[in-house]
Amino acid sequence: MHVRTLAVTDFRSWEHVELAFEPGATVLVGANGQGKTNLVEALGYLATLGSHRVATDAPLVRQGAERAVVGATVVHNGRELTVELEITPGRVNRARINRSPVPRSREVLGVLRTVLFAPEDQALVRGDPGERRRFLDDLLVARAPRLAGVRADYDKVLRQRAALLKTAGRRAGGGPPDLRTLDVWDGHLARHGAELLAARLDLLAALGPHVVRGYAGVAPDSRPIELRYRSGLGETLPPGPADVDLLEAVLLTELARVRAQEVERGMCLVGPHRDDLELLLGGTPAKGYASHGESWSFALALRLGSYDLLRAEGAEPVLLLDDVFAELDRRRRARLAEVALAAEQVLVTAAVAEDVPEELAGVRFDVHEGQVRRVR
């Protein structure tokens, strides 16, 4: 898979720019603040419908503009598809494939697959559980785009059930709450939650060995690592195939157990939205115990493992490396360059050309003062 063209309008700092790419390595060089990361972010957004830098769409639209448009032509197995997203904060985004509108923006998922490694990935190791849940769910969708529907259904039920709990909590202070509707939403939450949880466990079983190998490659002298799934059900669940019906029953039981607490606090206390991917280093949590170098190695291993998994399953993604070589030591640089060289397409950003290993020199664009110029 490779991107042949990228076009953005009113996206971040860019009023309009169109670029033509080739398979192999492409390097975007520019000082901080020149907009090179914005271009990589645009490709990541087309692949995931989300940004690796911000949680909402509003910052993606250029100041003074009402909407942003991002589009790319993607070549995969000899087939060429053009995908386009119109991003309008506060409204549903519009999407087109080959210029034809599609009913839901998530239908573009799978046209472009990317694995992006960026400085923000330190949060995968040192950040809150939400960072790791998002990592798992984004990879879930990249691996099987149909799971975007499961993820969206669960999020919708979660929001509606949370709103109902807040209402029930207020009524509880002035009289007995009517919880009959909550029983219905419990059923929806348990069903969609069980599907999402089962998919995560299956993913972790496939991903884990790739991450372990990736870590050993970038940090061979470090302590061994392990990935575990910590469930809000109070258990460390084993990765691998899971019985969705059984998980649904367990979730329903747990929801009934904490019903009074949820009504009192006005929030959902049970479900995969409260789970965590535990990252262990030498048997201890990497968060809080890993050194700076070990944290970088773990974050890199998670991304390399994701790339290897997708590639092994026949969906080779475009590799996006955003300002990371300057952060890595010689060994980690060499390992990342080795993987990048084997990729069908890799896009690299760097503040100075010297940060990029010579073997990845490839095609080079200079990004400066709102202009992108090919220099090699």
Image (cartoon, rainbow, N blue to C red):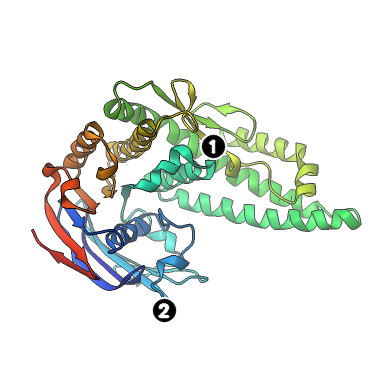
**Which quadrant would residue 251 be assigned to in this image?**
top right
Residue, far right: 175
Q: Is residue 68 left or right of residue 278?
A: left
Q: Which image quarter is the C terminus in?
A: bottom left
Instruction: Choose between 364 and 292: the one closer to the eye.
Output: 292
Q: Residues within 10 Å of mark 2 (few under 14, many from 20)?
A: few
287 to 133, vertically: above or below:
above
Q: Is residue 32 left or right of residue 224?
A: left
Q: Amino acid at mark 2?
A: Gly
Instruction: Choose between 345 and 198: the one closer to the eye.
Output: 345
- Residue carrying label 2: 64
**Which quadrant would residue 93 be assigned to in this image?**
bottom left
Q: Position of residue 344 (x, y in %)?
A: 18, 46
Q: Position of residue 351 (x, y in %)?
A: 23, 54
Q: Is residue 78 visible?
A: no
236 to 96, vertically: above or below:
above
Marker disc for residue 135: none
Disc number lying in front (1 or 2): 2
Residue, far left: 376
Q: Amino acid at mark 1?
A: Asp
Q: Position of residue 173 (x, y in %)?
A: 88, 54
- Residue carrying label 1: 276
User: Which residue: 29% across, 58% down?
Assistant: 32
User: Which residue: 64% across, 30% down?
Assistant: 234
